[in-house]
Amino acid sequence: MDQLAAMRALRRVVELGSFTAAADALGISHTIVSRQVRQLEQQLGAQLLNRTTRRLVLTGAGKDYYEASRQILDAIDDADRAVGQHQARPTGSLRINAPMAFGTLELANWLPQFIARYPELNIDLVCNDRIVDLIEEGFDVALRLTRDLPDSTLVAKRLASSQVMLVASPAYLREHGAPAVPSDLLRHNCLTYTLAERPNEWSFTSADGARETVAVKGNLRANTGIALRTAALAGTGIATTASFIVHEDVRRGELVRVLGDYTIRPRELYVLYPQNRHLSPKVRAFVDFASALYQQRDWD
């Protein structure tokens, strides 16, 4: 006896209310459905259905077996669908949301590789520095750089850590001097990122593990790290920014890292997507691609 086939037959009989309807739904004969259920009862040593001329009624044992077998069959069907979706070629439109600086300076560098791998996808990339509601605004997936993710129903997968550094232009440092300890920042023009949890409180950890927070001041606040980078390059002041935004400027000497003996808590890069029973092929492809990318390279 094929027990799974017999379990499916029993389920159809119970849910459709007759052997005939179950046979039609399964595409087999009434005789086969009846025999499968009878063999199942014989194997279990218990009667599962009370049969009358008008209706079929589950016995007590039948109710327990039906519920358990229904869960098993649902799990098998889910597994089959998951594999099918995993193997399906990603197509359609993929809406991605990302922070402005990350989307412009980082994601834009590797997104063409993703598009080349999945040419049937149409990418709609929206970059901004506000927290969007993925479901409300129709996004399939988002990338976030944050220290603490808020509670939500979204699935979040951590990809990498993004280092944070303080930078200033050589011209600014020649004019104002370089800070030697965090408290020296009180005498400097500090460029702040307004979407940080506490924009004017910069926290540092020394080499010996001591922590210090400084209440900084400055004449420029911005909600994008790109604007702060541009202002720092112009000699406006000292900016705290993700290293992926300024690492090329630092390499060329156009910006100089300050307080390099101190560390700032990094931000974590996450990929987020709505919680569904199974990922669509296009979202799965993007999540897998981003995960593999950041596992294979030393970011920042």
Image: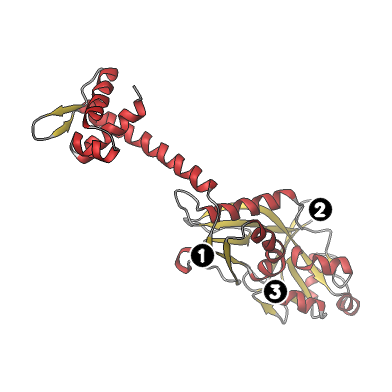
Horizontal and vertical percent position of residue 96: 57, 64
Q: Nearer the viewer, mark 1 or mark 2?
A: 1
The image quarter containing residue 188 is: bottom right
Does the image show residue 189?
Answer: no
Query: What amino acid is labelled 1 in the image?
Result: Phe
Horizontally, is 12 left or right of 109 in the view?
left
Query: What amino acid is labelled 3 in the image?
Result: Thr
Horizontal and vertical percent position of residue 246: 78, 68
- How far apart are labels 1 and 3 at the CA level? 29 Å
Query: What amino acid is labelled 2 in the image?
Result: Ala
Report the residue at 35% width, 25% height from top: 3
Report the residue at 24% width, 36% height from top: 23
Q: Disc 3, disc 2: CB below 8 Å?
A: no
Tell me the crowding category of disc 2: few under 14, some 14 to 19, or many 20 or more residues within 10 angstroms, Cα based. Answer: few
Query: 117 or 194, which lies in front?
Result: 117
Quarter of the image for the C terminus: give it: bottom right
Label 1: which residue?
139
Label 3: which residue?
192
